[in-house]
Image: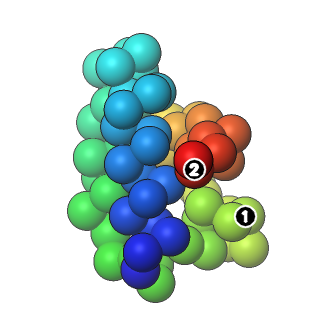
């Protein structure tokens, strides 16, 4: 999904370098998901049960693609 690729790319450029190690690991786990599995977590239509992944998802939602 192009939108997901753009969002994750922007996140990697701007936010990923500031993440704590546990958050970076959580991001890698999220990024390994298929787009159709990840998108509902990103847009909030599905709840994330992992608290660290939920932190990363909240950060992802703040990213604006240029």
Decide which of 38, 11 is in the foreground and name it.
11
Colour theme:
rainbow
Q: Is residue 40 above or below residue 48?
A: below
**Is there CB contact under 8 Å for labels 1 and 2?**
no
- Residue 25, given in percent of the width and then of the height, sits at 28, 36
Residue 44, numbered circle: 1
The front one of 37 and 16 is 16
Relative to residue 19, is residue 1 depicted above or below? below
20 lies above or below 8:
above
Query: Could you say whether the residue bearing mark 1 is in a helix, strand or loop?
Result: loop
Give the numbered dot on residue 29.
none
Quarter location, residue 34 = bottom left
Kindly identify the residue that appears in the image at 68 percent across and 39 percent down: 62
Q: Mark 1 against mark 2, which lies toward the viewer?
A: 2
Question: Which residue is at the front of the view, 54 or 58?
Answer: 58
Q: Which residue is mark 2?
A: 65
Q: Residues within 10 Å of mark 2 (few under 14, many from 20)?
A: few
Spatial separation of the CA atoms under disc 1 and disc 2: 18 Å
The quadrant of the image that shows the N terminus is bottom left
Q: Secondary structure at mark 2?
A: loop
On the rendered structure, is 23 left or right of 7? left
Residue 32, given in percent of the width and then of the height, sits at 25, 62
Apparent side of residue 11 relative to residue 58 in the rendered image (left or right): left
């Amino acid at each position: 999904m192009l939108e997901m690729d753009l969002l994750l790319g922007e996140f990697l450029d701007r936010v990923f370098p500031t993440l704590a190690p546990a958050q970076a690991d959580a991001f890698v786990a999220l990024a390994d998901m298929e787009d159709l599995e990840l998108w509902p977590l990103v847009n909030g239509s599905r709840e994330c049960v992992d608290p660290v992944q939920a932190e990363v998802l909240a950060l992802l939602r703040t990213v604006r693609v240029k």
